[in-house]
Amino acid sequence: MAQISVKNVKKMFGDFTAVRESSFTIEDGEFFMLLGPSGCGKTTTLRMIAGLELPTSGEIYLDGEEISQRPPSERDIAFVFQMFALYPHMNVRKNISYPLISQGMPRAAVKAKVEEVAGILGITDILDSPVGGLSGGDRQRVALGRAIVREPKAFMMDEPLGALDAEFREHMAEELRALHDRMGATTVYVTHDQLEAMQMGDKIVVMNNAVIEQFGTPQEIYDKPATMFVADFIGSPSMNFLPFQGKVAPGTEAVRLNGHDEAVPILMEGAEGDLVFGVRPEHVFLSDTSGYRAKVLAAEYLGTTQIVTLQSPNGELKARIDARETVSPGETVGLEFRSQTVTLFDKSSGKALRSALNDEVIGNG
Amino acid sequence: MAEVVLENISKSFGNVTAVDDISMTIPDGAFVVLLGPTGAGKTTTLRLISGLEKLDAGSVRIAGRDVGLETPAQRDVAMVFQQYSLYPHMTVRENLSFPLRSPILRTPEDEISRKVNEVAEILQIPHKMDNKATELSGGEMQRVSIGRALVRDPQIFLMDEPLSSLDAKLRADLRVELKRIQADLGSTLLYVTHDQVEAMTMATHIGVLENGRLVQYGTPRDIYENPGSVYVASRLGLPRINILPSELFGGDHKGPQIGLRPENIIEGEGSDARVIRAEHLGDQTRLHLDLNGHPVVTLIDVHHGYPSGKVIKIRPHNALYFDASGARVN
């Protein structure tokens, strides 16, 4: 098992910067997510850790050893791709045995090891079946088995569930996470699906345009986003952004939104001009007494909760409220915000202003 | 716009029964969603109504008229498919005008231009009217293909997973937009999806399909709160309803299987359950529990700590009960 440390790693393809000076550390045994939209550099980062790409500059440490220029075969890392490629002419057992046999492991040891892995994955009963007739889930388990059987120091996974349909993906995500909990192997996982990242990850790196926007635990990133990009990318529906003009200073405890004072966590830095009031949909409440009014545009029923789309003086926003509350499109309602959860952003830089809420997370960069 | 009535319709392909004796009424002005997994018969039902497939048995009536022998064009329905197919060499305006130029409709030019502009306003794409179809983003293309259906003013709109190829954010926006357009125009719309969020948020009525049969038909709230079977209960709700042996909780119970949604689980009293893992999704935290060897998923307060291995107590509250076959017991 392994700790992986990425230091100032940069990757250029010709003139194009795929990854800009990035640093982060993946602790031993962590399930670590690289999250971002397509083209953000997450897959390139993963491929550099695995040795499929060489960094233009910077270092990568595996258990303290610098490995950034070594070939993949000398890194002891297993890679699981989105499209799991199995040998179609071999049965399940042979597919899983293959990496061990090519390493020259004795037959008896291979057999024992394969049986053990099959037990972990729950595929003992299909070991002698051809891979041709297997379901998508079983094929995926076999592909995982082939990666696990080598007992590598770490696993790299590039959107391994991307090709599956939604219902099955959720099931496999749970299974993969449970497998990780049993084995405790360091895993680096690339995805563009924020829910998958939140659901499975111990830590998340959010990337955009070749840059790391934020690095932290799922709840930290959700509650205390460092940038507007992160606030928007994580969460569904995403954070509401209410733009306003204002001036804030260290110690400010409230801002004026369309003539109404709205409390915010005590600010630790100042800003002036185009600011943004950021509040998550579940922290917006309908209130008869509030003077901050908005018009209901739509209500979407979700069983336990409903999502209400509103037109406020500062733009459109969404509230996630109890499904039992009645709201009708067209009516005007008052809004309240759970003040201790609000994040203010500087619109031009897109960065969150430091406050009592997020100082611990973003204060040290 | 019109009411559409299906009476005992069936369709087989070889020895596979795709649609099995479905009867339902799609009221005038309703937004009906057919919900079910792949292979449940959703798309075939849609194609039977449009005339792209021929009925084996039963009848389809649109505005009171039996359309069984009519061609798709004669039925006056508009379809929107998952893969938007626009004419790439035409501008948005030409793409939108095209259906109205059909020899059957023979629409006057000034009428075409009025309609196309009106639809462009509704879809919020008037500034893109002179762009080539290939110069649009995925979301804009799908809006144009919906627009091409809207200009026609047909008896019914038939939509087959029109949002499923779009990314999550755009899908959420178009959900609200489509619902608004349908409500504004008062159109009758039949929409096929396997996405429960689309079904719950847009539908006035949901029809749940299982192996070609219509197993329940009602409002989203009715289907969520009063499912007739384990199958239907499992279609709606995230995280999915927990189906467990009732005896796990002891005492009296109305049936051998108990169905628990997160809001039906009270924490702090009842049976012991061991925490496997807390999943932080941001706005909610899912707690995975082991209850006597059975997995249970529930929701907990976002910022509360539940370390793995901790034992908590849970009990049912307003639970649903089902018999051994999965049918609801009241």
Image: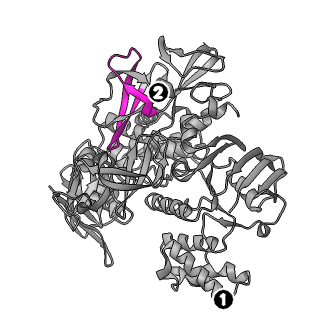
Q: Residue at x 60, y 85 (%)?
A: A111
The residue identified by callout 1 is A107
- Chain letter, disc 2 residue: A
Q: Nearer the viewer, residue A312 or A215?
A: A215
Residue A109 x %, y %: 64, 85
Residue B42 x %, y %: 33, 60
What secondary structure is marked by label 2?
Answer: strand
Three-letter amino acid code at disc 1? Arg
What secondary structure is marked by label 1?
Answer: helix
Magenta stretch: give its range.
A281-310
Magenta residues, dominant SS class: strand
Q: How many discs mark residues in the rendered view?
A: 2
Relative placement, left or right, of A214 versus A59 is left
Q: Is residue A144 above or below residue B144?
A: below
Q: Quadrant of the N terminus of chain A?
A: bottom right
* Mark 1 or 2: the one toward you: 1
Q: Are marks 1 and 2 on the same chain?
A: yes
Q: Is residue B272 above or below residue B128?
A: below
Relative placement, left or right, of A321 versus A262 is left
Residue B67 x %, y %: 24, 58
Q: Residue at x 38, y 29 (%)?
A: A297
- The quarter holding residue A101 reads bottom right
Relative placement, left or right, of A42 versus B324 is right
Residue B33 seen in render? yes
| Crowding near the residue tagged with mark 2, few <14, some 14–19, many ≥20 C-alpha atoms within 10 Å | some
- Chain letter, disc 1 residue: A
Q: Nearer the viewer, residue B187 or A175?
A: A175
Q: Which mark is residue A160?
A: none
The answer to if A294 sits in the magenta stretch is yes
Q: Which mark is residue A316?
A: 2
Kindly report the distance in space between the C-alpha atoms of the residues bearing marks 1 and 2. Answer: 65 Å
